[in-house]
Image (cartoon, rainbow, N blue to C red):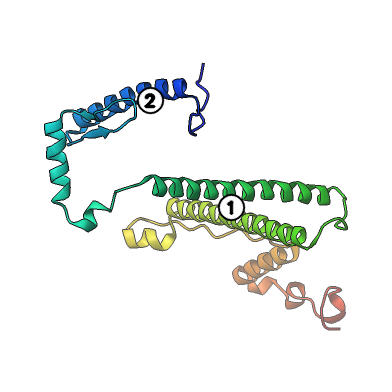
Amino acid sequence: MTRSKVKISYITKDSARKATFRKRKKGLLKKASELSTLCGIDASVIIYSPYNTQPDVWPSPTEAQRVLSKFKKMPKMDQSVEMMSQESLLKQRIELANKQLKRQCRDNREKEITQVMFQCLGGQGLENLNMMDLNDLGWLLEQNMKDIDRRIYMLTKASHSQGSVAAASASATMATPEAMLKSGEKVHVESPEREVSPETEQRQQLIKDLMHSPENMRLDSVFSFGDNNPNAFFP
């Protein structure tokens, strides 16, 4: 079970204030002893209270005097660097509380405007918004658009990088004839087969026959011109 947070304020009841003093003093001296032992530092505590005629000194009056003498030998500026009074402590806490309040107000406002944005996307109009609401809504939309553009840029860049790596891998695995010739390897290049029409095959065969037996062949049987050739380009 967690302990409830104690409200730091003056205790008006005498008996409760005295009991709290005794308990807190014991805890403070224990913490000072642990700090000195764990970190190996010089520490001293002097407590004045209306419940004792003499102040409470830890760890001893002689050791406290030594620590105070060491402190007084320091320059005035160095003495006040880490020194904190009750007034400065309260100012520090107030400043910290104001920062936390501003941060919380900003977060609440952003959540409120985000809800308004979704309502507008759902079909609700902008008639009930004042100038401050419209300005905040415009700022929120601009931030969301920047986030979207940034995400698109990152995805596009990643896609291009993957494409470049794949292209480099593919080009590395393919051996071109020029590279094979430079390396001394034999290259066998096959020319693609071309389709030959029947007329071309017939003419090639006739040319071969003419070359082997020209006396038995007539020119008009080899080539057709004019009206004898229905596929001629010129009449």
Query: Gap in Å between the C-alphas at discs 1 and 2?
Result: 63 Å
7 to 213, vertically: above or below: above
Q: Which mark is residue 155?
A: 1
Q: Which residue position is annotated with label 2?
A: 21
The picture places residue 86, in percent across and down from the top left corner, at 39, 44
Residue type indicated by callout 2: Phe
Of labels 1 and 2, the one closer to you: 2
Residue type indicated by callout 1: Leu
Looking at the image, the residue that sits furthest to the front is: 53
The picture places residue 176, in percent across and down from the top left corner, at 44, 59
Looking at the image, the residue that sits furthest to the bottom is: 235
> Camera-side residue: 81 or 195?
81
Q: Could you tell whether 104 is left or right of 138 in the image?
A: left
Q: Secondary structure at mark 1?
A: helix
Q: Residue at 23% across / 27% down in the picture?
A: 33
The answer to which quarter of the image holds residue 217 is bottom right
Q: Could you tell whether 228 is left or right of 165 in the image?
A: right
Q: Residue at 11% across / 32% down in the picture?
A: 62
> Camera-side residue: 106 or 47?
47
> Camera-side residue: 156 or 83?
83
The picture places residue 47, in percent across and down from the top left corner, at 28, 32
Q: Residue at 22% across / 54% down in the picture?
A: 78
> Camera-side residue: 185 or 194?
185
The picture places residue 234, in percent across and down from the top left corner, at 83, 83
Q: Contact, CB < 8 Å: mark 1 with mark 2?
A: no
**Circle 1 Cα neighbour tier, 10 Å, few/some/many (<14 / 14–19 / ≥20):** few
46 to 142, vertically: above or below: above
